[in-house]
Image (tube, rainbow, N blue to C red):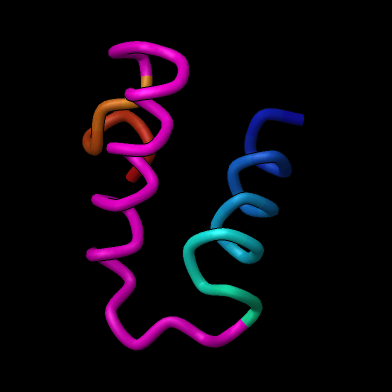
């Protein structure tokens, strides 16, 4: 369920339903957003 939620968030809020050109940047952006909202359990290395 966690991975589905992460994927949904990437698709809707980071990619805005478009294809990614640079996958690594998406992980960095998502990591920052999740850390702001939920804390340090979503570091880049943890979700990559």
Q: Residue at x 34, y 88 (%)?
A: 21
Residue 24: percent from left, percent from top: 24, 64
Residue 15: percent from left, percent from top: 51, 72
Q: Residue at x 26, y 27 (%)?
A: 43
Residue 36: percent from left, percent from top: 34, 24
Q: Is 30 positioned to the left or the right of 18 in the image?
A: left
User: Is residue 15 in the magenta section?
Assistant: no
Q: Residue at x 65, y 78 (%)?
A: 17
Compared with 25, 40 (above or below) is above
User: Is residue 30 in the magenta section?
Assistant: yes
Compared with 38, 26 (above or below) is below
Q: Is 20 positioned to the left or the right of 25 in the image?
A: right
Q: Quadrant of residue 48?
A: top left
Q: Is 5 positioned to the left or the right of 29 in the image?
A: right
The kind of secondary structure the magenta stretch mainly shows is: helix
Stretch in magenta: 18-41
Q: Residue at x 69, y 53 (%)?
A: 8
Say which of 37 and 41 sits in front. Answer: 37
Q: How many marks?
A: 0
**Quarter of the picture holding the N terminus:** top right
């Amino acid at each position: 369920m966690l991975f589905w939620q992460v994927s949904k968030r990437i698709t809707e809020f980071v990619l805005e339903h478009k294809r990614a050109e640079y996958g690594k940047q998406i992980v960095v952006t998502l990591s920052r957003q999740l850390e702001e909202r939920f804390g340090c359990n979503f570091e880049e290395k943890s979700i990559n």
